[in-house]
Amino acid sequence: MSTSFDTLDSLDTPAAVIDLARMQRNIDRMQQRMNALGVRFRPHVKTSKCRPVVRAQLAAGAQGITVSTLKEAEYFFAEGVTDIVYAVGMAAHRLPQALALRRRGCDLKVLTDSVASAHAIAAFGRANGEVFDVLIEVDTDGHRSGIRPDDPVLLEVGHILQAGGMRLAGVLTHAGSSYELNTPEALTALAEQERAGCVGAAERLRAADLPCPVVSVGSTPTALAAAHLEGITEVRAGVYVFFDLVMHNVGVCTTDDLALSVLATVIGHQVDKGWAIVDAGWMAMSRDRGTQKQQRDYGYGQVCAMDGTVLPGYVMSQANQEHGIVSCEGAPDRDITEIFPLGTRLRILPNHACATGAQFPEYRALSADGLLAAWERLYGW
């Protein structure tokens, strides 16, 4: 981490800026909710991939982390985090990397959702004298991967792991379809569907004399909407730490909660079109147009003043590789040069914080005194 400091006025652009006060508020909100619901909270660090962010989550009370790559696991294990769930289906070619982490003292849990994968994990573990902790992924909403809670394959996979000498650690699910919802009632209903499905899978395994100590659920919307979490041992969520415009459209945050923005500079105009051109294109914002299918389309991002105040109606409507087009929704704004003179600095709120963060090798962490520290961000797989 750099020890040098800049301000928003002096910082080169484009830059990914974290509002630290907002981030800490988001961390505290989620942790307090999990504490009130009586469950362990295991944040998904794929959103930030950043040591100081994860330190803040752990300091608030999180227990262990969730990762989406083994490179993340190695990175945060080196930071001293030992309790890690690798929440992506285990591919056979990654088993040596997982083994190396466990041999170095990392309490790494891996994931399977098929008979073939379970056989591969068990065979590799036996060949190398390793007892892997394995979670079975359960599909509770038809969104992505996993075994349906009532599928006979669930028990087959459990028996393969148990008979193969592995440790059946439990079940895990992710209600990713929550991103498609936008009412409290629908979110609460899906949170209950996620909870009940995962608990049902755990009960089936236990009824078959198979262990199932961990019952893990999680997405940011369902974590914030769940009425209760009876039978659940832990919750995972990631994007809550920054939030974004997709989450705003889902209804779980306001724009004042969005902690990540991209600082950009106005470098030109097309007056007849009502455009201000900035030096942040899709290479800075990402190609993610996640709000396009929601009730409010923000283009490539919501435009804010340099102090973070939302400028209603102004969005990044188009983006090229290194150029972004800021315009007013509706009729072209012929006074665009007066509203955003050349050199004006703007902050753009992203559609998807994970995707936008991934465009940058570092964040600039904005403190209350206006100073910006450089925070390294992990890249790659």
Image (cartoon, grey):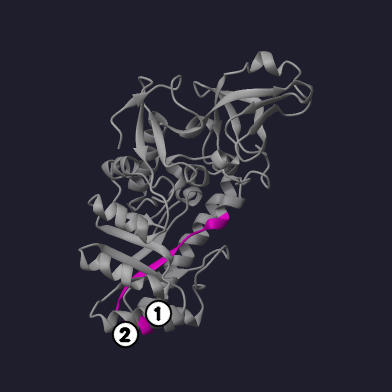
Residue sitting at 68 percent across and 16 percent down?
Answer: 337
- Residue 279 in view in this figure: yes
Q: Does 133 sit left or right of 250 as displayed?
A: left
> Where, by quadrant of the figure, is residue 183 drawn?
top right
Residue 142 position, x and y percent, is 58, 66
Question: In the picture shown, does residue 145 fall above or below 359?
Answer: below
Question: In the picture shown, does residue 237 fall above or below 103?
Answer: above
Circles 2 and 1: CB atoms closer than 8 Å: yes
**Residue sitting nearer the eye, 100 or 113:** 100
Magenta stretch bounds? 158-177
Q: Amino acid at mark 2?
A: Gly
Question: In the picture shown, does residue 13 fall above or below 350?
Answer: above
Q: Secondary structure at mark 2?
A: loop
Could you tell me which quadrant the N terminus lies in?
Answer: top left
Q: Which residue is mark 1?
A: 118
Could you tell me which quadrant the C terminus lies in?
Answer: bottom left
> Where, by quadrant of the figure, is residue 6 drawn?
top left
Packing grade of label 2 (10 A; few <14, some 14-19, many >=20) is: some
Q: Which disc is residue 164 wearing?
A: 2
> Where, by quadrant of the figure, is residue 345 drawn?
top right
**Residue sitting nearer the eye, 27 or 124:** 124
Q: Secondary structure at mark 1?
A: helix
Q: Does 245 sit left or right of 354 as displayed?
A: right
Residue 162 inside the magenta-drawn segment: yes
Residue 107 inside the magenta-drawn segment: no
Residue sitting at 47 percent across and 69 percent down?
Answer: 138
